């Protein structure tokens, strides 16, 4: 079971009503797109170091992007003060990224859902790109993969990811996922998987209902630097191959670590 804890934003947008003379909170995106509301879901587990940057990126563009709420679906370690200053909602429950994101989507109230990893920061122009996409398209969308590493190895990997997306239409969760609630529910949403939940959902969405936003999702390169780029790439590809032949996600997860 997941438990929701409300965390109030000290910078919440407030308007004064003329008749009552009271302060009434307004939904953030009324200024831009009153008919379309966005819920952001961020799954976390031992993410205290990276989470503040991710939430700050979202909070800075709440109004412009039309964000109704930011839901931190926590599987361990995150506390209310960690998310409260960003106006987020803390959703506690069992760990498992698929399970956490499914719970976040169930609790969300927005017309559109944006799933974003806790070690990913969206690049310049993301809010406008998201708002435009929600207004003009019914397709799901992902961002351009980028790493926070200046090495040539990182640039090579980024180009390989572009190639993978073009050939196989297979973006991973570290590219984020923007999807309308209608499409999300039509394909069955996230399944409670401990790993490969992103591949599983994107495969059900399908190439014809997926597009790419020309905005970077800048993700931590920690695993690649720690394990070595070649070793980590081989491990990721092996996990994908194991998934494609039906290896249970729990076994894949043990190999992935």
Image (cartoon, helix red, strand yellow):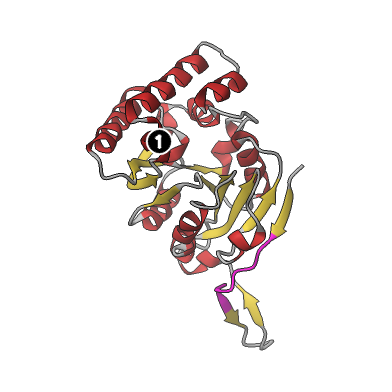
Residue 6, percent from left and from top: 69, 61
> Residue placed farthest to the top in the image?
245
Question: Which secondary structure is most common in the magenta stretch?
Answer: loop
Return the x and y of residue 112 as percentages of the image width and height. Answer: 53, 48
- State the extent of the magenta-drawn residues as a range: 6-14
Q: Is residue 64 above or below residue 257?
A: below
Q: Looking at the picture, how far across and down is residue 163, in whole percent?
A: 29, 27
- The secondary element bearing badge 1 is classed as helix
- Determine the residue positioned at 64% across, 82% down: 23
List the residue tagged with mark 1.
Answer: 226
Q: Which quadrant is the N terminus positioned in?
A: top right
Query: Is 201 displayed left or right of 5 in the figure?
Result: left
Visible residue check, residue 209: yes
Residue 51 is inside the magenta segment:
no
Which class describes the residues within 10 Å of circle 1: few (<14), some (14-19), or many (20+)? Answer: few
Q: Is residue 163 left or right of residue 234?
A: left
Most distant residue in the front direction: 226
């Amino acid at each position: 079971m997941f438990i929701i804890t409300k965390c109030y934003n000290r910078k919440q947008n407030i308007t004064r009503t003329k008749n009552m003379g009271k302060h009434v909170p307004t939904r953030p995106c009324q200024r831009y797109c009153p008919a379309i509301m966005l819920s952001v879901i961020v799954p976390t587990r031992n993410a205290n170091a990276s989470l503040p940057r991710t939430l700050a990126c979202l909070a800075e563009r709440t109004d412009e992007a039309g964000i109704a709420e930011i839901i931190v679906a926590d599987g361990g370690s995150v506390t209310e003060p960690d998310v409260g200053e960003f106006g987020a909602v803390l959703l506690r429950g069992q760990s498992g990224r698929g399970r956490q994101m499914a719970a976040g989507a169930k609790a969300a109230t927005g017309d559109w859902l944006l799933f974003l990893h806790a070690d990913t920061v969206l690049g310049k122009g993301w809010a406008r790109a998201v708002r435009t996409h929600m207004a003009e398209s019914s397709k799901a969308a992902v961002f351009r993969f980028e790493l926070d590493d200046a090495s040539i190895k990182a640039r090579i990997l980024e180009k390989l990811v572009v190639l993978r997306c073009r050939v196989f239409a297979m973006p991973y969760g570290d590219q984020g996922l923007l999807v309308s609630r209608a499409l999300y529910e039509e394909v069955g949403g996230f399944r409670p998987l401990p790993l490969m939940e992103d591949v599983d959902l994107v495969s059900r969405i399908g190439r014809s209902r997926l597009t790419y936003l020309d905005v970077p999702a800048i993700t931590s390169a920690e695993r690649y630097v720690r394990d070595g780029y070649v070793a980590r790439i081989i491990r990721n590809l092996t996990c994908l191959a194991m998934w494609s032949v039906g290896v249970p996600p729990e076994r894949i997860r043990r190999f992935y670590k």
